[in-house]
Each structure stands twice: as C-alpha cells, then as structure tokens.
Image (spheres, grey):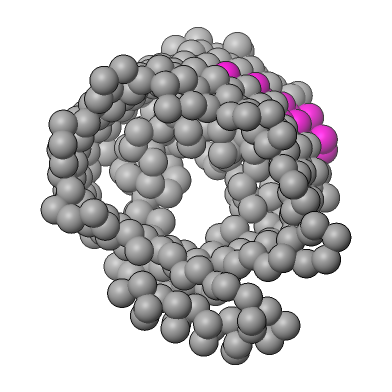
C-alpha cells in the first residue's frame, strides 16, 4: 500500500508540478460516508452524506541556505452525489526556515483551526459549526471560513507552543460570500496532557470580530475539552448589529478500539434579541475495525429558543437540514464509516 501511494504521488507530481518532480510527494485522504435520519420540526429528512471526504497532495523539499519549500493541494470528494472541483480545499506554497514557516494561498484561518480543536464531532451531522462561529439571523457563516488571497506566518520556536498570524486581502471567491479583508491570529500550547489556546479574528469591512478560548486536559483514556466564544457582528446594518457569546464542553474516552464521545454547546441570546439562544447535545460511539477504518453511531439534539433558528449539519457534513421555523427542536441519528489513507 505504501509503495502504491509513492508511485501515485510521484505520477501526480510529474504531471502537475514538473519543477517538483524529484521531491517527495505524500498522497493522503479520507472517505467519510454516513446515513442520516433528521427531524427538522415539521417533518423530517434522510440521506447519504459525504462528510467532507477529501484527497490531498503535499510535499517538502530542502533548498539552499537552510530553507525548505512546502506545498499542499487538497480537494473535496463528494462521493455521494455531485462532482467536486480540484483544489477546492486548502492549497498553498511556502517556505520554512528552522521553526518558522510562511505560506501563501487559500486555507483555513487560525480562528477556524482553533475552533476545530475543540469539536469531537467535526465533519458529521453534529459538527458544532451549526451553532458556533455564526449568527442564525443572516443565514450564513460569519467566521470559520477559508481565507482567499492569504498569507500566514507560523512559528513553533517554543516547545509545544504554536503561533499563527494570517492576513487575507479578501476576494469574491471567499466562502460564505465574504469579500472583506481578514486578520486572524492564534496561540496554542499542546502536550499529551494539556491543551490551552486563544484565537482572535477581525473582518474590516463588516466590522465583525471574534474571540475564542479553549482548554483541555487528558487523564487515563479520557480527554475533556472546553471552548468559550465571543462574537461581535458589528453594526453595518440592523440584522448584524448584535453580539453574542457561546460555550461548550466535550469528553472523549478511549477503551481499546472503542471510543465514547459526548458534547454540549450552549449559545446565549443575541444582545438585541431575547430568547434567541440554543442548546446542542451530542452522544456517540465509534469502533476501529482496523487502523485506517472505523464505524460510528451518534445521536444529536438541538433545542432552539423561540426566536432562534440554528441548525444541525451547518458545515462539513454535506447535506443541509434546516429547521422548519424559529424555535424548532431538531434531532438526528447518524451511522457512518471513515477510511483514512
């Protein structure tokens, strides 16, 4: 299998990146399929979802003067329905020197990356981005985007500590229709036992900003992680003139090949709209049948306050299930399988 990956990677490199034909190319990916049944209030839905399945190519080559060049091209694979565009996910080219790296391209903001570290159900129907990093009023994400025309500096000089600083010029091709310049930064301290992090992001034209704090601790086979989020949606128009906070916690317990997971997210009211919060609870179990392949089952429950319209499957899942009206309680059962290579 490893030899096949090397052969495939070298072939792709010669066809797409002639200048890097001699560099080592890594081919990686994930196929993640699930069968879902969802209650959206007035009725329900069901389907087969691709859950951000992907394939990627990345490489690194040593240069003169202690420098190395790094690159990555990653594509979504919607293997349950439509075709996917090549390079639709993170893609960049950069240089590294010692513990410092500078890349340019299209990729996740540090704010989004930090949030993902606290989500035990990422890329499933219960991905926490259905309630985190957004407001329900505008109907689309305000944070947790991939930034276009971006440059990012990463430093790992201090052991177990990572610093990221990103600046995006913005363009009409940004996800969620966001064309504003973005500045995003994060600090993260991570060991096998502890996780502490903070991230801040500002979007100039929309006058929006966000702050995230995360913390985690591991003991035995259990890891507990918490997140706090404060979002300021600015006052560029009446719909976006509200602030709100959110918090959450999850616990992951491993017992050999089996993993138990539980997660809660509580979103507080928007400052100018009472009864506009939501609560999201998720429980699941997964089991590895082999090192690269696991199966899972999960149950998700989302309770909207009477003026709120948050949703399950907000991002990363594939299929979109929206509540039938404000104040609706949603629930879902999902069974899936994940193969990583």
The quarter in which the C terminus is drawn is: bottom left
Judge left or right: residue 85 versus residue 106.
left
In magenta stretch: residue 192: no
Q: How many marks?
A: 0
Mostly what secondary structure, the magenta segment?
Answer: strand
Residue shown at the point (43%, 65%) measured from the top left: 28
* Residue 43 pos. (x, y %): 20, 42
Q: Quarter of the image holding residue 209?
A: top right
Q: Which sits in the foreground, 291 or 48? A: 291
Q: Which sits in the foreground, 261 or 36? A: 261
Residue shown at the point (20%, 51%) measured from the top left: 294
* Residue 20 pos. (x, y %): 68, 79
| Whether residue 299 can be seen here | no
Q: Quarter of the image holding residue 243?
A: top right
Residue shown at the point (58%, 38%) measured from the top left: 112
Question: What stretch of residues is rendered in magenta?
Answer: 201-213
Q: Which sits in the foreground, 245 or 324? A: 245
| Whether residue 157 can be seen here | yes
* Residue 250 pos. (x, y %): 34, 22
Compared to 74, does 222 lie above or below?
above
């Amino acid at each position: 299998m490893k030899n096949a990956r090397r052969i495939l990677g070298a072939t792709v490199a010669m066809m797409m990146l002639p200048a890097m034909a001699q560099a080592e190319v890594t081919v990686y990916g994930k196929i993640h399929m699930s069968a879902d049944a969802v209650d959206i209030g007035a009725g329900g839905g069901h389907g087969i979802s691709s859950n951000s399945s992907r394939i990627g190519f990345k490489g690194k080559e040593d240069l003169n003067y202690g420098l190395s060049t790094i690159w990555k091209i990653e594509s979504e694979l919607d293997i349950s329905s439509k075709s996917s565009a090549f390079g639709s996910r993170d893609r960049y080219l950069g240089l590294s020197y010692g513990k410092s790296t500078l890349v340019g391209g299209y990729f996740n903001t540090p704010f989004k990356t930090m949030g993902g570290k606290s989500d035990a159900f990422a890329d499933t129907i219960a991905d926490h981005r259905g309630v985190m990093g957004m407001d329900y009023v505008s109907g689309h994400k305000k944070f947790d985007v991939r930034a276009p025309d971006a440059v990012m500096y990463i430093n790992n000089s201090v052991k177990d500590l990572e610093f990221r600083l990103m600046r995006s010029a913005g363009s009409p091709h940004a996800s969620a229709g966001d064309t504003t310049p973005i500045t995003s930064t994060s600090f993260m301290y991570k060991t096998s036992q502890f996780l502490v992090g903070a991230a801040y992001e500002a979007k100039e034209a929309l006058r929006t900003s966000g702050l995230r704090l995360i913390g985690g601790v591991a003991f035995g086979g259990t890891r507990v992680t918490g997140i706090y989020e404060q979002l300021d949606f600015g006052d560029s128009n009446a719909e976006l003139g509200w602030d709100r906070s959110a918090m959450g916690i999850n616990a992951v317990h491993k017992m050999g090949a089996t993993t138990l997971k539980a997660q809660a997210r509580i979103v507080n009211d928007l400052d100018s709209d009472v009864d506009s919060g939501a609560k999201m609870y998720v429980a699941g179990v997964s089991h590895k049948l082999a090192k690269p392949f696991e199966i899972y089952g999960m149950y998700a429950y989302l309770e909207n306050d009477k003026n709120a319209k948050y949703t399950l499957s907000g991002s990363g899942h594939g299929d979109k299930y929206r509540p039938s009206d404000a104040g609706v309680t949603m629930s879902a059962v999902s069974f899936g399988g994940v193969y990583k290579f």
